[in-house]
Amino acid sequence: MEQVNENLEIAKRGHVNSLTHDELELYEKVKNIYAERVHVGCTSCNYCMPCPKGVDIPLNLSLLNDVYMYKNLEKPTGNYKFLKGKRMSAGYCNQCGDCEKNAPKTLK
């Protein structure tokens, strides 16, 4: 609760155009790094669901993005091993394209 109150106090002091030039440059730099590392622009909106094969498309894309975002295979691989053999894993995708027709973003 202390952190919430602190965040509220900081937000009260903020106002439009209060960031310095250096802060705006840092924001743009960080935003570009994130954009470069996101492999698939999935927002987990679930419009691509349901998959006729039972694949949990947002979960699988999130695991894929984790690999690119954090440049670390260990955690996503461990999570994917948990899914492997289960109907929700990407291995059951038959590339029917239903998800691509319904998704507001490109899934490729």
Image (cartoon, rainbow, N blue to C red):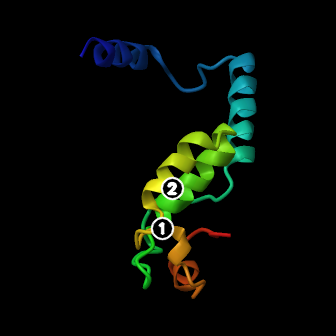
Residue type for callout 2: Tyr
Q: Which residue is mark 2?
A: 80
Quarter containing the C terminus: bottom right
Q: Is residue 39 left or right of residue 60?
A: right
Q: x, y (%) of residue 90?
A: 53, 69
Given residues 105 and 56, the one toward you in this image is 56
The answer to whether residue 87 is above or below residue 38 is below
Q: Residue furthest bottom?
A: 96
Residue that appears at 68% across and 55% down: 39
Q: x, y (%) of residue 89?
A: 48, 67
Quarter containing the N terminus: top left
Q: Is residue 106 left or right of residue 56?
A: right
The answer to whether residue 97 is above or below residue 24 is below
Residue type for callout 1: Ser
| Nearest to N terminus: mark 2 or mark 1 | 2
Q: x, y (%) of residue 35?
A: 70, 46
Circle number at residue 78? none
In terms of secondary structure, where does tag 2 sit? helix
Q: Residue furthest left?
A: 1
Q: Are marks 2 and 1 in contact (CB under 8 Å)?
A: yes
| Viewer can see residue 74 | yes
Residue that appears at 64% across and 59% down: 40
Residue that appears at 42% across and 67% down: 46
| Viewer can see residue 103 | no
- Tally of numbered tags: 2
Q: Which residue is mark 1?
A: 89
Graded by Cα atoms within 10 Å as few (under 14), some (14 to 19) or many (20 or more), the crowding at tag 1 reads many
The answer to whether residue 70 is above or below residue 48 is above
Cα separation between marks 2 and 1: 7 Å
